Amino acid sequence: MEIVVLVKQVPDTESIIQIGEDNVSIKTDDIKWVMNPYDELAVEAALQIKEAQGGTVTILSMGPDKTVEVIRTALAMGADTGVHINDPATVGSDALSRAKLLAAAIRARPFDLVIAGMRAVDEDNYQVGAAVAEYLDIPQFTQVTKVVVENDTIKCHQVVEGATVVAEASLPALFTTQRGLNEPRYASLPGIMKAKKKPIETLTLADLDVSPETVGPAGRKINVTALRFPPEREPVKMIDGENAADIASKLATVLHEEIKVI
């Protein structure tokens, strides 16, 4: 079983986010970078399938030099090899361009299964996993909470509004992870030491046979025109009274005279 896991490095959700001077990006100097939490679920799922079925787990990520940190983290958890797409020409790529690059890297190697987090907590657009499956022309399952792989078949439990859908397909296929699928393991000290010796292949745009015009700023379908923080909300107004009837009367007065909704 040849498994590829898509991993992204994102700002820690506890980091204080500040808008950059260009008003279209964030300041990155003081941010702590971590593996996308949903991708941690994807790595754990891959390792469990490998332990049951045998095979290898390859971690695939794209980004600047520091992206190697999250690849090493996944290798320390137990993955076998890493692939890092690192090319200045890809900086500024949107979700579809990133998917095109990731799919090109996957297509160049044997694979049976691709696993990704259902979303990244930075841009939060849910697009990359689905787009990779489309570019590879393979079945996809999204927001998976349970997965069973047997021989050449995969069966997934997918979360939908108010219910769960159970679907199956033949491999190769792609699925994206939802919370509840598993509990990611921690990297052990021996795993961390072994990860330092595991191979990480670096790919550039030239290695992927992808046109420069389709990635980076030139290939964007959506452009960010400005970033703004939400406006501050007015302080909550507490309504006190001697009893429920008194409070209800005062509330009605506020809704009628101040907020003017009744």
Image (cartoon, rainbow, N blue to C red):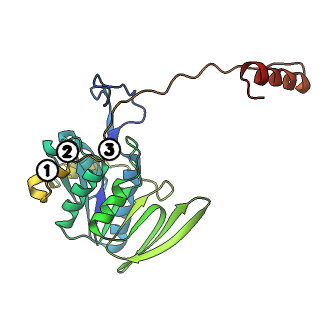
Residue appearing at x 28%, y 29% in the figure: 28
Residue 185 visible in the displayed image: no
Residue appearing at x 24%, y 57% in the figure: 100
Residue 145 vs 122, above or below: the answer is below
The Cα–Cα distance between marks 1 and 2, rounded to whole angstroms, is 8 Å
The Cα–Cα distance between marks 3 and 1, rounded to whole angstroms, is 17 Å
User: Mark 1 Cα within 10 Å, few/some/many (few <14, many 20+)?
Assistant: some
Q: Earlier in the sequence, mark 1 or mark 2?
A: 1
Which label sits on residue 222? 3
Under mark 1, the amino acid is Pro
Q: Earlier in the sequence, mark 3 or mark 1?
A: 1
Which label sits on residue 218? 2
Rendered location of residue 13, percent (x, y)? 42, 36
Residue 194 vs 14, above or below: the answer is below
Quadrant of the rendered structure where residue 152 is?
A: bottom left
Residue appearing at x 19%, y 60% in the figure: 105
Could you tell me which secondary element the residue under label 1 belongs to? helix
Marks 1/2 in contact by CB < 8 Å: the verdict is: yes
Residue 113 visible in the displayed image: yes
Dividing the image into 4 quarters, which one contains the N terminus?
A: bottom left
Could you tell me which secondary element the residue under label 2 belongs to? helix
Q: Which residue reaches farthest left?
A: 206
Rendered location of residue 74, percent (x, y)? 29, 52
Where does label 1 land, which residue? 212
User: Seen in the image, is 154 located left or right of residue 158?
Assistant: left
Residue appearing at x 20%, y 66% in the figure: 107
Foreground: 93 or 1? 93
Under mark 2, the amino acid is Ala
User: Mark 2 Cα within 10 Å, few/some/many (few <14, many 20+)?
Assistant: some
